[in-house]
Image (tube, rainbow, N blue to C red):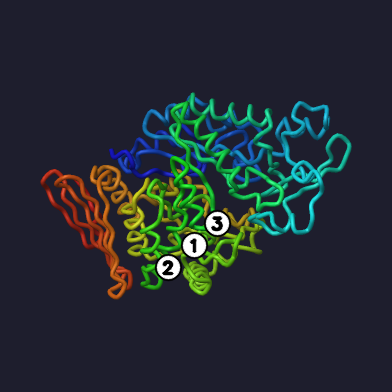
Amino acid sequence: MARNAVQLITYADRLAGDLGGLTALMASAPWNGAFGGVHVLPFFTPFDGADAGFDPTDHTSVDPRLGTWGSIGALASQGDVMVDIIVNHVSSSSASFLDWCARGDESPYAGMFLTMSSVFPNGATEADLTTVYRPRPGLPFTPYRVGGKQRFVWTTFTPQQIDIDVSHPAAQDYLNAILEAVAQAGVTMVRLDAVGYAIKTPGTTCFMTDATFDFIADFTAKARARGVEVLVEVHSYFERQIAIGAAVDRVYDFALPPLVLHALGTGDGAPLARWMDIRPVNAMTVLDTHDGIGVIDVGADQTAIDRPGLLTPTQLDALVKQIHQNSGGTSLLATGASASNLDLYQVNCTYFDALGGDENAYLIARAIQFFVPGIPQVYYVGALAGRNDTELLGRTHVGRDINRHYYTSGEVATEVSRPVVAALLELCKFRSTLPVFDGEFAFSHDAEASEMSMKWSAGQSWAVLEVNLARREASITWSHEGAEGQTFDLLASPPSLD
């Protein structure tokens, strides 16, 4: 299997019940051979908190309802495993935060949690506060009673997620303990969740500052010393992603999903072609994740609005409207003011529904993703070409839950028999097993003909993807070990080395 084989992104409980079930699933047909690794979304205690595991009370323990660290080790014995380290915040129900609330300055955790006064010891002006970048409306503070006094505690995301001072000794010990636990379990890569917000410096946006890069570099060095690579998760302006990519092991290509949607929706591949020329190649390529489809990643710089994005405001507005139309309006129910977690930079929708359930277009989008340099990841709902879960959204009123379906084992068995899912898993196997994807890459784009070509070559082997965006047609041709193959229908005849 190629060193940059396709990885699956999944919650343990929402696809296979628990970690043991996930390990068994990945070893069974038709999943085995399709994926070289798994990004297991938070399985810490508890995995079902206010933000679906991204607010653990104990980040060093596996929730016993899902398994143990031994379960993670068993999964790691089958392939690469990536897990999340939530560096920006802890749960408001964590023992350390509760101790500080109860004892105030007498707590050993005093200073570990950020407050308005700890970041702005001389007070904050209106300009100071409005300069702070936050992916939610309003100010990033929540009133908590601490040591008998009312304090404004820094909460970038939700009131239940308490931001920490990553430079404080207690916070350093906390983060080091998490890193040690995951490394001991055989984890090969960690994803630094929300790291862009981790450093708060007065007078700045408090987002991806020079101090943030220093923190990332320091944490990366600690991870590498334990044999663990670091993936940085930041939704941001595209030029900032390029800078991040130059400083870390891996960075997400969050610009790819909206650019592919724009290209297939309009026939205009120019923005995608521009991105192909400048994007970081040490990327994890995604079309979907546990969050929504990012629009901030292709728009103007939110911290300096005069810096244009990869898509113009008109193109971006048209894209969002098209997604809502293609999804039959269901994505609109889960986005913006309709969602309790007001994401200002995402459209909540499955990628399959964002393309209107067009199976051919969906497979072309995946083929483009798989040919773009990097390590491709496929979200579990996307792996099953899932539709928007409006029932779950109606129960939780959390916008992102529309793309976080709970699959039963019976549902999984039914879904993998669908032609589009079977074809996608075959495409995953092709991408994961053909060694040529470790070779040399070439890209070309003919704007007038609305065509693009991607070619990988290594010695006498090669693979070529050709796409007509306007007609939504694609072909893949390849040569491997002296044998050649081709397909002009990714749905009826996906590429295969068998």
Q: Looking at the rendering, which quadrant does residue 105 occupy? A: top right
Is 186 left, or right, of 192 in this rendering? Answer: left
Residue placed at 22% from the left, 52% from the top? 463
Residue 109, image x and y in percent?
74, 29
The residue to which callout 3 is attached is: 402
Q: Is residue 318 above or below residue 372?
A: below
SS for callout 2 = helix
Whichever of callouts 2 and 3 sits on the residue coming sooner in the sequence is 2
Q: Nearer the viewer, mark 2 or mark 3?
A: 2
Picture mark count? 3
Q: Helix or strand or loop: what does disc 1 sit on? A: loop
Task: Report which residue position mark 1 lands on.
Answer: 298
In the image, 413 versus 362, the foreground residue is: 362
Q: Are marks 2 and 1 in contact (CB under 8 Å)?
A: yes
Give x and y (percent) for residue 172.
Answer: 63, 30
Comparing marks 2 and 1, which lies closer to the viewer? 1
Task: State the image coordinates of residue 116 (x, y, percent, origin top left).
Answer: 77, 46
Residue drawn at point x = 39 percent, y = 46 percent: 282
Pick the quarter of the image with the C terminus: top left
For label 2, the crowd category at 10 Å Cα-Cα, with few meaning under 14, some 14 to 19 and many 20 or more, is: many
C-alpha span from label 2 to label 3: 22 Å
Q: In 3D space, how far apart are the residues under numbered discs 2 and 1 (Cα atoms)?
A: 11 Å
Tell me which amino acid carries mark 1: Val
Q: What residue type is labelled 2?
A: His
**What's the amino acid at mark 3?**
Ile
Q: Which of marks 1 and 3 is in front?
A: 1
**Where residue 199 sits: x, y (%)?**
64, 43
Q: Is residue 189 left or right of residue 273?
A: right
> Which residue carries the number 2 mark?
262
Closest to the observer: 221 or 44?
Answer: 221
Between discs 1 and 3, the one toward the N terminus: 1
Tell me the CA gap for discs 1 and 3.
Answer: 23 Å
